[in-house]
Amino acid sequence: MWAYIAKRLILTVPVLLGVSFVVFAIVRVLPGDPAQVLAGEAATKELIEGLRRDLGLDRPLLVQYVDFLGSLLRGDLGRSIRSKIPVTSELAIRVPNTMILALAGITVATLVGLPAGIISAVKPYSLIDTGVMLLALAGLSMPVFWSGLMLILVFAVLLGWLPAVGTGTPAHIVLPAIAVGMTSAAIIARMTRSSMLEVLRSDYIRTARAKGVAERVVINRHALRNALIPVITVIGLQTGTLLSGAVLTESVFAWPGVGRLMVEGILARDYPLVQGAVLVVALSFVLVNLVVDLLYALADPRIRYE
Amino acid sequence: MRPLLTLLVSLSLLSGFGFAAGAAPAPRGGTLIIADGVDATTLDGHLYTDSPTAERMDHICETLFDMTPEGRLEPRLAVSSSFSADGKRLTLKLRSGVKFHDGTPFDSKAVKFNLDRILDRETRAPWRSLIDRVTEVVSLDPSTVVLLMNTPFSPLLVHLSHTGTCMQSPTAIQTKGVDYARSPVGTGPFKFKEWVRGDRVVVARHDDYWGEKANLDEIQWKVIPDDGARVLAVEAGSVHIAKRVPPREIERLRGVRGLRVEIVPSLRTIYVAFNVTKPPFNNKKVRQAMNYAINKEAIVKAILAGAGRVSDAPIVPAVFGYSKTMTYEYDLDRARALLREAGFPTGLKAVFHHPTGRYIRDAEVAAAIQGLARRIGVELELQTMDFASYIAFLNKPVTESTVQMYMLGWGTVTSDADYGLYSLFHSINWPPPGFNRGFYKNATTDSLLDRARTTLDPDERKRLYAQAMGIIMDDAPWIFLYSESQVTAYRGEVGAVFMSPQERLVAGKGFLRR
């Protein structure tokens, strides 16, 4: 198992190298000049050209990429073109915020979605099942820039129970976690229902019931564990997505995370910021995939990694 | 119009103060939280380019002169000024007893350091062009500094009130290097405390300030990008002030207890410029027809909920040099007649580029223009892109530019007509690098604008600008749309905080009622 983990971690390196090249190339293909953006609308040609030289943008692309790689290997992601703040410092603040939001969101999603999917599967085509699936559809359909505002309106403005926006206290995470968890909960509920229905039709479930095993035990011990593999996959994918930054949620709730940082960086053509943020997101995805694969082994004893 | 603007701003100030003269002193203490849609981009006063950053810097760093919201230039760190007879030498007397927040004395050496830093091309100061006529800064004695020029430059004093020329601690700049941009040091009523990028900037009262001490303990600018969330935050009381309230919320918020909404005319003019070097807009009659075809009153009323002012000149009333010139009244018959005379009896087609989310409801305004133009047979294809790409697209030289008509805004932030007219209508400012992106050129206009910036007599300058604006309006290189107004929501406990025409909140004397 440890050898497997070590191998996967080593494989992260070429993945990140590939990502570094792709993001380096893509931001430079975008129209718009970072020097012009930095210099502002009222800039002179002389100022723009001077800034281009300062930022090293007048060098050949290959030279720029090699320079970038060299710094990356030293752990230096450069400085934001706009703020001059080291990218690592920027990410050091934003990444924990994003992790908190992602973990809180996926917790809400799992705590709501998993039981909802199980209940739906256990009582298929019933009123409960229809109700749960309708709620899931609503959760999937509601855009977060609307549902987020509704949550603020009800819980912050009308009831005054929770803060509207920002960070600082545990209460601040509640509304964003619900907003971002709603969509994931819907996806998890649907996947759980689908997977459980398939498992509940299996011969060994019929056998367990025929043997007189309590229904609660049939569901929780026999069916759920076998239905978990695709559900774990979905939870993993949703976690990865949330770790890449929930831009709309971050904007509505003024949550300073990686998603907003990336969008701001792209709009400002802040190459170092975008490159750094994308690399961190890529690393998150790789690590989340590794954790998901390890959880497979926990859920299904037949899966073993060498 | 300037008296009306003065009245509007004064009323705004008085309502903000909320108490009659001679009443109890303003309460002290508390943290004022301002919700803004965007964060500062840097905290180096010489390197910023945007209004939100300038608003924060204005509370930390001060300029030699202060431009009041009413358009008066007043002493601040400089107490007096005098030009030599030939206009090539400006002598400034400095305020004594002032120190930067880090204890560095403010004197003529500090002024020279700051101005030299801005003038140094290696600094890459975006606002260098404001003072680039200065060839040398001389520190005569600790309280006297002299600026030397090769030719007179009348807007110089006004430009020394621009935030981009603010005074920052030489010690801090020299010791902190590139990291200075994260922790500025000025002479202002507040000193820098914290910047969590993307989240907040916090400043704290400077108890050794040379002037009237601030009432507030701290001011916090909180970044809330979403318009709806920003409004809800001020309703919920999570913040005290919400900037850039969407026009559609004005009526509703006015009915909310504990809130007040203020609309303040801005220095920013929104316009649609034509590429006057290429058909069909190389024909003045076509451009005038477009002006007559667009119902600007309806746009301001319907899309901006009245938070705007139809343009009657290329610049706004709050700018020195403004005079009411003319408006193109909505007249479809006249528009169609002009098109016929221009040789387009059945209309024409063109591509109209516009930004989205850069100005208040810009995309909706562009769509309205498209619909209105259709009534005279002008079919406009709308194209939009993100702002960085947009500016890159517009900044091409005349031989490469493919733009036909484009929407932009321009804030005459110096409150002087030179910045608004010379930058946008003089032929020397064809891009790159200039901002006359429609390639307008009129030799008489050029001459008038050149003379206006070298004449020291303010009345003569006004006369020259009036003449220039008359020609510009008649030539119609733009559709002269409107100037924006800033809509701001305040909680009732906020006092003495107001929005200036420069689109900046001024909270230096602000307070929070218990």
Image: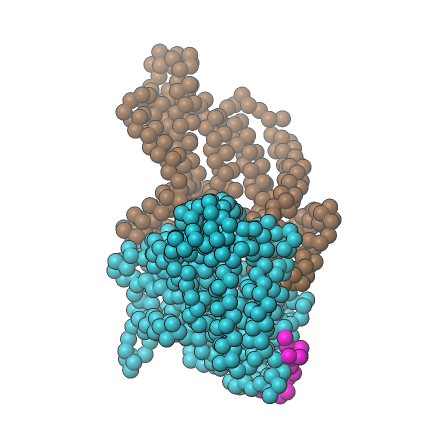
User: Quick one: B268 or A281, which is closer to the camera?
Assistant: B268
**Residue at 39% across / 34% down in the picture?**
A140
Q: Quadrant of residue B175?
A: bottom right
**Residue at 46% across / 63% down in the picture?**
B268
Residue B318 as seen in the image, left or right of residue B129:
left
**Location of residue A304 in the rendering, given as x and y in whole percent from the top left corner:** 57, 24
User: Quick one: B436 or B194, which is closer to the camera?
Assistant: B436
**B510 in relation to B434, above or below:** below
Check if residue B230 falls in the magenta segment: no
Q: Say if residue B183 shows up in the picture.
A: no
**Residue at 38% across / 57% down in the picture?**
B330
Q: Main secondary structure of the magenta part?
A: strand
Q: How many marks?
A: 0
Colouring convention used in this rendered image of the protein: by chain
Check if residue B147 falls in the magenta segment: yes
**Location of residue B469 in the rendering, given as x and y in whole percent from the top left corner:** 49, 68
Residue B5 as seen in the image, left or right of residue B135:
left
Q: Say if residue B444 shows up in the picture.
A: yes
Residue B315 as seen in the image, left or right of residue B493:
right
What is the drawing colour of chain B?
Answer: cyan
What is the drawing colour of chain A?
Answer: brown
Q: Which residues are magenta?
A: B133-151
User: Quick one: B369 or B473, which is closer to the camera?
Assistant: B473
**Residue at 68% across / 66% down in the picture?**
B122
**Location of residue A206 in the rendering, given as x and y in whole percent from the top left corner:** 38, 13
**B320 in relation to B273, above or below:** below
**Location of residue B447 in the rendering, given as x and y in whole percent from the top left corner:** 59, 72
Which corner quadrant holds the C terminus of chain B? bottom left
User: Quick one: B420 or B47, which is closer to the camera?
Assistant: B420
